[in-house]
Amino acid sequence: MTLPARFRSLLVLALLSFTQQGAAQTPTVPTTKIKVYIVGTFHFDASEADLNHGKAVDMRTPQKQRELDELVSKLRKTQADKVFVEYQLKEQPHVDSTYALYRKKQLKARNNEVYQLGYRLADKLDRPRVYCADAQLGLDFDALMAYAKQHGQEAIANGFMQVQPGDSMGQLLAARNRLRHVALPTSGVFPGATLLAQFKVANSADFDRANMDGYLLTG
């Protein structure tokens, strides 16, 4: 299992600028830096892999489809050369085949951020391929809880996992977030907000720091 994740990185939009290789095909050093945009999102269809499963949101309704189009219209302005999604490299053949069908309008897209957002954006940018970029770091949750019990730290572990923070670590996280005036939605969704409004908040510097606290303070 992974650590509880309210928002996770879905899209990496890369603006690539390389010098051309010489006739001998000798690799050259890029003359300019690569600009990378990392876009945080909640799991549209929830996630059984995370301790905090979240709540599924149906993105296939007419209203949500309009909101997705609005969001993608903003992301298109990056003119990214490549779009990466949160799938492991072994999934690349699957992504290649399903994205090809998506571009031909022959795929019934699942209620998943990779399809609903990643594929939509790449298609609007007229990019021929979507790239996989994910690695499973993993967390042995059973071993973590066994260690906490053995060392009298169950309150710390349980406080961190609770939706409403309890003792120790949970209270510390809540206090730090209050200082930043940031509230992390437990389902990954801000009630009543459009997708564009949600993404603006979820990708702000303060929200990102608050979301990473759980990883940094328990790492």
Image (cartoon, rainbow, N blue to C red):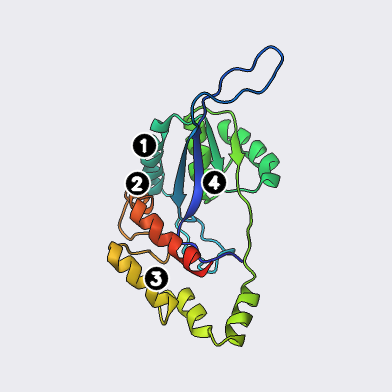
Q: Which residue is mark 2?
A: 196
Label 3 crowding class (10 Å Cα cut-off): few <14, some 14-19, many 20+?
some
Mark 4–mark 3 CB contact (< 8 Å): no
Q: Earlier in the sequence, mark 2 or mark 4?
A: 4
Q: Is residue 59 visible?
A: no
Report helix, strand or loop for mark 1. helix
- Quadrant of the frame with the N terminus: bottom right
**C-alpha span from label 2 to label 1:** 9 Å
Residue under the point 64% across and 41% down: 95
Residue 170, percent across and down?
42, 76
Q: Earlier in the sequence, mark 4 or mark 3?
A: 4
Residue under the point 37% across and 64% down: 184
Give the residue type that dot 3 points to: Leu
Q: Which residue is mark 3?
A: 173
Q: Which residue is mark 1?
A: 74
Mark 2–mark 1 CB contact (< 8 Å): yes
